[in-house]
Amino acid sequence: MTEINPEPVDQTTPVEPSPNRIWSTTGRLAVVVLVVGLIALLAWGLVQAEKTPLEEGMAPDFTLTSFDGRTYTLSELRGNVVIINFWASWCPPCREEAAYLERTWRKYKDKGVIFIGVDYADAEKPALAYIDEFDITYFNGPDLGTRISQSYNIKGVPETYYVAKDGSLRGNHIGPLFEPELDNRIDELLSEPYTK
C-alpha cells in the first residue's frame, strides 16, 4: 500500500482568488441582476396589459394648457360634446387621421362640439410643426407628466374619447379614425337631450 504523506499548508499566507473565481462571482451577480430586471419588466408589462382604457362613467376631469397659453378644464365644457384625441408628432397612425380630425372639427365647431388634442410624450418643437403641417386649429396642448393619459389609461396613440354633453364617457377608439366614424359618433351624441 502506498503511503500518503501530505505536506503541511502554510496558514499565514492569504490565498488570493484566481481571476476565474472573481469573474464567476461577477458573472453570477450580473445574471442575478438581469433575471431580477427581466422579472420586474415582465411584471410591469402585465400591470400595463391589465389596464383597460376607460369607456364608461364620468370622464376624468383635467385642465390642459394649450401651446399658446389658453386653458380648458373639461368639467367647464358641460353642455358640449367633447372629443379628446391623444396624439404625438412621432406617431405615423396619428398622421393618418390628422386631416380627417381637422375637417371634422371645422364641420362641427359651431354646433356645440369641442375638440381637445392632448399631445402625448412629445417635444414642443416637433408638436408645433405637426400642428402647422396639418393646419390644425382646434385646441391642443402637451400632456405634461402624462397625467391626463394616465387618468384615461390610454394604451397608445392615437386614441380618441367621446364625451357626452353631461360629461359622461361614451366610448373610445384606439388607432386612427377614418370617415365617417367620428361624424357618426358626434351626430349620435349631439342628438341626445341635455338638461343641466
Image: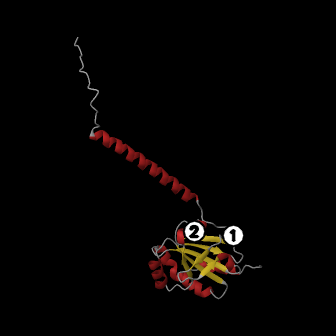
Q: Nearer the viewer, mark 1 or mark 2?
A: 2
Residues 122 and 113: in front is: 122
**Which label was assigned to residue 44?**
none
> In the rendering, at what x and y percent does residue 161 appear?
61, 73
Residue placed farthest to the top in the image? 1
Quadrant, the N terminus? top left
Q: Where is residue 97? Give x, y as percent.
A: 52, 78
Residue type indicated by callout 1? Met
Instruction: Looking at this view, name the residue that lies furthest to the left.
Output: 2
Which residue lies under the disc numbered 2? 147
- Report x, y in % for residue 82: 64, 78
Label 2 neighbour load within 10 Å: few <14, some 14-19, many 20+: few
Residue at coordinates 25% horizontally, 21% vertically from top-left? 8
Which label was assigned to residue 58?
1
Separation of disc 1 and disc 2 at Cα?
17 Å
Q: Amino acid at mark 2?
A: Arg
Q: What residue do we see at 37% from left, 43% from top?
A: 28
Quadrant position of residue 147 = bottom right
> Could one spot residue 94 in this view of the protein?
yes
158 or 7: nearer the viewer: 7
How far across and down, in percent of the image, does residue 168 sit? 69, 72
- Identify the residue at horizontal 42%, vertical 48% (top origin): 33
Q: Earlier in the sequence, mark 1 or mark 2?
A: 1
Question: Which residue sits furthest front?
Answer: 12
- In the rendered image of this protein, does residue 137 appear above or below residue 168? below
Q: Looking at this view, is 118 or 4 the one in front?
A: 4
Neighbourhood count class around disc 1 (C-alpha, 10 Å): few under 14, some 14–19, many 20 upward: some
Do the CB atoms of the residues marked 1 and 2 lie less than 8 Å apart?
Answer: no
Element carrying mark 1: loop
Q: Is residue 178 visible?
A: no
- Give the quarter of the image for residue 159: bottom right
